[in-house]
Structure formats: C-alpha cells, structure tokens
Image: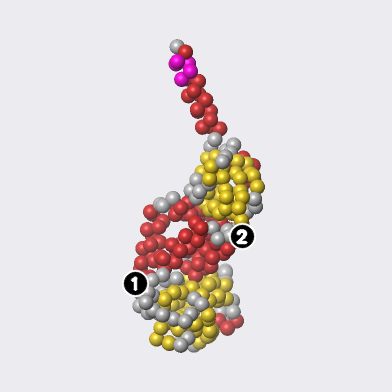
Amino acid sequence: MKTKLLSFLLLLLSATLIHAQEAKFMVLGAKGEITSNGKEINVGDMLVSNSSIKINGTSPYLGLAYIAGGTLELTKKGSFKVNDLEEKLSNQNNDLASKYVDFIKDELTGSSEVSSTQAKYGSVTRSLKKKPIYFYAPINSNAIKSQVNLTWALKEGVKSKDSFKIYIKDRKQHVLIEDDVKGTSYNLDLNDPKLKDQKYLFYYVEDASNHKISSDIYAFTVYMMGEDKETDSELAQLKNNDTAIGHLILAKYYEEKGFIVNASSAYEKAISLSNGDQQYTKMYQDFQTRYGS
C-alpha cells in the first residue's frame, strides 16, 4: 500500500513540475557564453518558464522566438528570468511576422518543405548562368526601390585581381551607371536620379582588365511603393522591427516574394545587428548557395 502511495505521489509531483515548466521561447541565434539554469544554450533549444538565462562573453547575442508569437533579442550581459521576458511580449503579436518566424524555425530545425522549394528555385536560376562571373541572384527577379547590395563571385578556376566594372542599363541598353569596383560587391541605390525611375533595369559586371571575364546580363523589375496596397501594408508591418531578427524576417519575406537582392541586403543587416551570429551567417550562406553558381 505504501509503495502504491509513494508511486502516486511521485507521479503527481512529476506532473506538477511538467506543468510548471512550459516551453516559452525557441532560440533562433546565440553568440557568447549563454546558459540557462547552468546549461549551455544552443540554437533550436526551448527555454521554459520559471527558468533563468545568464549572458556573458564579448559582444553577446541571444535571439528568441516567443511560442505565442513575437520575437525578442538580448545583447547585454546579465541574468534574465524567462517569466519576465514573457511578460514583455504578452501583448505583442503580429501574424504576418509570426509566419516568417515559423519559416526561420523550420530552417533551423531542418524542415524539408521550405528548403526544397527554395532549392528548386535556386537550381533553375543556376542552369541559366553561363559566364565566368555570377551574381547571388536569379537572372530575372524583382527589387523594391531602396538600397540593395549586388554581390558576385567567380566560378572555380577563374582568376581576377578583384577589380571590376559594373554597368546598369535601361531596357534600351542605354548605360545609366558605369562604376569601378574594388572587391565583389556593389551598393546600388535604386532611388539614384541617374536611374530615372526606370521600371526595368539590367546589370552585369566584368573584370576591369579583361572584359571576357564577365557575368551574364541580369535584370530586375523595380517595385515602387504604391503599386500594390497589400505589399505596401506588409512591408510597413515588417519594417517596424529594426532588429537582427526583424531583418531576418524581412529576408524571408523578400525571398518568398521574389525580391532576392533585397533579401541579400536584409541578411547582411541581420548578421551585422547580431554581432555576427554564426547561425544567421550560415542561413545567408545557404541563401547564396541557392542563387549562386
């Protein structure tokens, strides 16, 4: 009888403890010396209620997704209680942002559905690229009128001194911008008066000393605010979150909508704001693999 009673009490205690510790946050990014109740925190871990977090290290970063919607970032050293963090987010919920947070969770946990769709799109664009230089973008894509970073690389075995010339043209092949570039990236302001509010832009890059080492001609259709009310509304919602996770969400939104060059810029901003979070960097590298050669 005593054995049965003891077993019942242990079962009751176990159920009480499980109820007392509910999953509240998923770790999206972690950099530095970060522990929860003395155990090291890793990407994909769940933080439970009634637990505590300790953050140390140089330029630390912790990115969290709240189980009920919303995101939170911690960039300062110190100790934090999960219950207190939950209280800060209890009234914050954005269904649109939550959708893309779910995309990020799926990628972090290895969900095949999202990754396979993106990989298929990337494989199609790779098959069109024939020249020695390639951009990390489809041959044809869309771009929101803003500052975008065009990044390229050379195919294996191709040598260059990292000095290039980039050309931006209109649909009649008039040169709108011609610039010398040191390195393999170029910041293009789509609001530049030189572009004359062109709807369609074409661009390519070539080695400064050997024009035979060049890229294919790429193109994007420029989206201007006001063209679509739904897109304008969604961008207004998502751009309110000027954090690393906020820009990661934007990157996923841009990619899904076909704004690939904007997605690239958003990934770079997310990495910068997260102090170089390793997982965000890997997500950007995977993105480049999808759209590179």
Q: Is residue 234 visible?
A: no
Q: Is residue 19 above or below residue 180?
A: above
Q: Residues within 10 Å of mark 2 (few under 14, many from 20)?
A: few
Measure the alpha-carbon separation of dots 2 and 1.
Answer: 36 Å
Give the residue number, with chain letter if any, for mark 1: 127
Q: Is residue 182 visible?
A: yes
Query: What's under tag 2, amino acid-wise?
Result: Asp
Where residue 218 appears, x then y in whole percent?
43, 77
Q: Secondary structure at mark 1?
A: loop
Where residue 178 appears, x then y in whole percent?
52, 85
Magenta-drawn stretch contains 5: yes
Chain part drawn in magenta: 3-7
Dot 2 or dot 1: first in sequence order is 1
Q: Report the disc number at residue 257.
A: none
The residue at the point 63 percent across, 44 percent down is 80
Q: Is residue 2 above or below residue 128?
A: above
Q: Secondary structure at mark 2?
A: loop
Along the viewing direction, whichever of 115 and 160 lies nearer the viewer: 160
Q: Is residue 157 above or below residue 86?
A: below
Give the residue number, with chain letter if any, for mark 2: 242
Q: Is residue 209 left or right of residue 93?
A: left
Q: Residues within 10 Å of mark 1 (few under 14, many from 20)?
A: few
Magenta-drawn stretch contains 139: no
Q: Identify the main secondary structure in magenta.
A: helix
